[in-house]
Amino acid sequence: MGFKTDAIHAGQEPDPSTGAVTTPIYQTSTYVQEGLGKHKGYEYARTKNPTRLALEQNMAVLERGVAGYAFASGMAAETAITQLLLKQGDHAICSDNVYGGTFRLFDKIVRHYGVEFSYVTTSDSETVRKALRPNTRMVFIEPPTNPVMAITDIRSIAEIAHANDTRVVVDNTFMSPYFQRPLELGADIVVHSTTKYLNGHSDSVGGIAVLKHKEDAEKLAFIQNAAGAILSPFDSWLVLRGIKTLPVRMEAHNANGMAVAKYLSGKKQVQKIYYPGLPDHPGHDLAKKQMSGFGAMIAFDLGTLDKAKAFLGTVKLCSLAESLGGVETLISHPATMTHASVPAEQRARLGITDGLVRISVGIEDVEDLIADLEEAFKKI
Ligand SMILES: Cc1ncc(COP(=O)(O)O)c(C=O)c1O
């Protein structure tokens, strides 16, 4: 089926007991068994829940994987992936420009279990090749990177990593499977913060991992049950509902993202702009090859912390908030918000300056968004 059809129907048969068109919220912790060892496939809701299963099956289809597993947050999904791929004595490579929380998980928690991490510029595939060691078991990338939107070549990283028997994990939160499908490009695991575009309405926190290999899927199912960081039935239902409109929302985000990026690139107060849809973005050509849209995440540098503060203090329609991917426009200051856990010197090297502002362009009328930004530019 086409993507839009799958977004609405995959994994969601009419409810077998009532015929309900929408998958119900199965708000139960356990299931009655007919006799010892005789049940309908459901024993206990940490292990399996029909609402969560519908979401997991839906996402497995959309990301072209063999199975998906939904977790209580994007970070919980990433944690489970580290439990799947890494053990004491292993080495992992991570893009030096990922979501701050991902770096924090790897550096402050997983590292203490005896796993060594190298943080490298993954937009240069040769750097990844050089960083590989015989014991490298994971390469973790986030194309486009957060927040400066650098693009990593998924296909080339997968080729290099697979020659070393290393799994490639792609955080696809910014693009969603509507614009980018990493498993088709050679990656082994896709992870999402469903909190963002998949749910799309800023009213749920969740995460999901989709796997390409059956053996990984079996192990992750075990980890999901054994470690237990599952997504609730209500949140699973919200994300399922959100995904039904993912294609139309992503088209609208993309159109508004491009319009706002063009507007920002014409402002003299903007010293630098990061949006892969602009032809002078260093990853533009690669982005055109591996993504079918550019999304709605833009970062721009106003030069100083004072200017960023004045700008962020003036906008009204754009809400000052962490997170992204909702229908409403959110604006943030990476250095003190999403990337505060990244050491200052690393932030400086990555271009996450004190003047950098990140905007997650929503699907409001774009004229209203631009009018709001225009007022803020008058203050700096
Ligand atoms: C790209 C990216 N990956 C992962 C996460 C973590 O997801 P969650 O906040 O749902 O735990 C975030 C959160 O902002 C993110 O932006």
Image: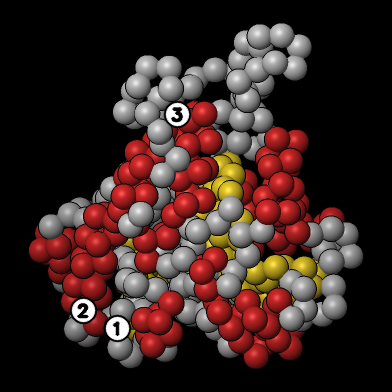
Residue 242, quarter of the rendered image: top left
Q: Is residue 104 visible?
A: no
The secondary structure type at the circle numbered 1 is: loop
For label 3, the residue is: 234
**Residue 282: quadrant of the picture:** bottom left
Horizontal side of 102 relative to 359 (left or right) equals right
User: Counting residues from the N terminus, which is met first, the one under dot 2 or under dot 1?
Assistant: 2
In terms of sequence position, does the residue under pointer 1 or pointer 3 come before the other? 3
Q: Earlier in the sequence, mark 3 or mark 2?
A: 3
**Residue 222 against residue 300 in the figure, above or below:** above
Q: Is residue 211 left or right of residue 197?
A: right
What residue type is disc 1 on? Leu
Can I make out residue 219 in this image? yes
- The reply, left or right, for residue 87 in relation to residue 195 is right
Tag 3 secondary structure: helix
Q: Marks 1 and 3, how far apart in space?
A: 39 Å
Kind of residue indicated by mark 3: Phe
> Closer to the observer: label 1 or label 3?
3
Q: Which residue is mark 2?
A: 262
Residue found 70% across the figure and 68% down from its top: 167
Q: Nearer the viewer, residue 336 or 181?
A: 181
Give x and y (percent) for residue 134. Answer: 85, 78
For mark 2, give the secondary structure: helix
Amino acid residing under circle 2: Lys
Report the residue marked by disc 1. Answer: 278
Rounded to the nearest angstrom, the CA distance separating label 3 from label 2 is: 39 Å
Q: Residues within 10 Å of mark 3 (few under 14, many from 20)?
A: some
Measured as percent of width and height from the top left, residue 341 is found at 60, 61
How many angstroms separate mark 2 from mark 1 (CA)?
Answer: 8 Å
Look at 23% across and 73% down and name the residue there.
258
Residue 156, above or below 110: below
